[in-house]
Amino acid sequence: MTVSIRLPDDLERKLAEEVRISQRNRSEVVREAVGEYLSRRERERQIEEMKAAARLLYSDPEIVRHEQKIQADFDAIDDCLEKIEAEERAAGTDLDETWWE
């Protein structure tokens, strides 16, 4: 597809400078710039959609309670693991040593 665009003078100068420095033709530089712009916009939209979904989820008190329960379960597991590691260190076990090797 062929596209014709008009650029303001400042963008035209920047484009000409990039063409000179990169030693590529104008079409290559513009094609790359448009591709990068469209990819960035797609990522931005996806992030905004995820933020909206998270806001929606966290506006539901039942989901918030469930998440807090899951977090409490993980905290309890972390506490238990920390206690086991402390006991192993006290017994002289090197926790950085891999026992299966």
Image (cartoon, rainbow, N blue to C red):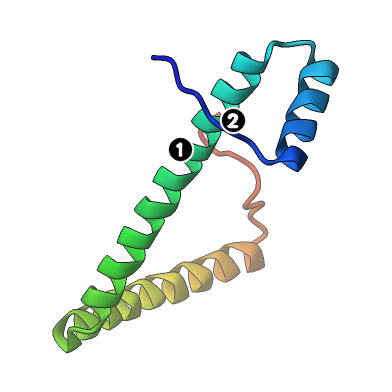
- Using the image as rendered, state which of residue 64 and residue 35 is in the foreground: 35
CB within 8 Å, label 1 to label 2: no
Q: Residue at x 35, y 52 (%)?
A: 46
* Quadrant position of residue 8: top right
Question: What is the tally of numbered marks visible in this picture?
Answer: 2
**Height in image: 24 above or below 57?**
above
Q: Determine whether, in the image, residue 23 is placed left or right of residue 42.
A: right
Q: Position of residue 47 (x, y in %)?
A: 40, 56
Q: Residue at x 34, y 76 (%)?
A: 71
Q: Determine whether, in the image, residue 58 is placed left or right of residue 99.
A: left
Q: Position of residue 59 (x, y in %)?
A: 23, 84
Residue at label 2?
A: 33
Q: Position of residue 80 (x, y in %)?
A: 42, 73
The amino acid at mark 2 is: Ala
Q: Residue at x 59, y 30 (%)?
A: 33
State the CA–CA distance, disc 1 to disc 2.
Answer: 9 Å
Q: Position of residue 89 (x, y in %)?
A: 64, 63
- Using the image as rendered, state which of residue 64 and residue 86 is in the foreground: 64
The label number, if any, that marks residue 38 in the structure image: 1
